[in-house]
């Protein structure tokens, strides 16, 4: 559970009573509801930003060239090259190109490079299945 820290403001007030200067300290607490409302506003803005273009974005929405180039961090000309080669999954409606985020993710992760551990594991499996015959 998150604690709400309230800001305290200390006000010093000087008063003269019977020829003496008396300093009175007044501690004033901020309204806790204002603090809560400020935090809720920040949370709402963060959620809106995440849902618009973050991990909560709708994966079924089609992407155009500009959105795809921002998503995979490559130039639009490289994407046009991939589409002309037929190496990237895409849809064409007239002259416009569209891409599905799920298919793009599958395309990106379909070309995994094996690590040294993966190669050793495959080699050991091959040796186990195909022993040498002397």
Image (spheres, helix red, strand yellow):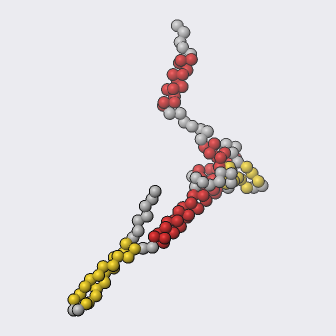
Give the side of residue 74 with respect to residue 15, left or right: right
Residue 85, placed above or below residue 52: above
Q: Residue furthest top?
A: 134
Q: Residue at x 28, y 88 (%)?
A: 15
- Residue 26: % across, % down: 33, 79
Between 129 and 88, the one lying in front of the other is 129
- Residue 41: % across, % down: 53, 67
Q: Is residue 81 visible?
A: no
Residue 82, placed above or below residue 14: above
Give the side of residue 89 with respect to residue 2, left or right: right
Between 65 and 71, the one lying in front of the other is 71
- Residue 61: % across, % down: 68, 54
Q: Residue at x 59, y 38 (%)?
A: 111
Q: Is residue 48 visible?
A: yes
Q: Residue furthest right?
A: 94
Q: Residue furthest left?
A: 19
Q: Residue at x 28, y 86 (%)?
A: 14
Count the marks: how many?
A: 0
Give the side of residue 86 with respect to residue 124, left or right: right
Q: Residue at x 62, y 50 (%)?
A: 78
Q: Residue furthest front?
A: 18
Residue 20, placed above or below residue 6: below
Residue 45, placed above or below residue 26: above
- Residue 134: % across, % down: 52, 7
């Amino acid at each position: 559970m998150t604690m709400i820290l309230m800001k305290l403001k200390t006000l010093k007030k000087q008063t003269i009573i019977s020829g003496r200067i008396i300093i009175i300290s007044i501690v004033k607490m901020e309204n806790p509801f204002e603090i809560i409302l400020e935090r809720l506003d920040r949370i709402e803005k963060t959620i809106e930003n995440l849902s618009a273009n973050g991990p909560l974005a709708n994966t079924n929405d089609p992407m155009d060239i500009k959105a795809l180039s921002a998503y995979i961090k490559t130039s639009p000309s490289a994407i046009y090259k991939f589409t002309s080669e037929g190496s990237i999954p895409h849809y064409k409606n007239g002259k416009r190109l569209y891409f599905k985020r799920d298919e793009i993710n599958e395309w990106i992760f379909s070309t995994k490079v094996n690590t040294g551990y993966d190669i050793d594991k495959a080699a050991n499996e091959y040796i186990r299945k195909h022993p040498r015959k002397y």
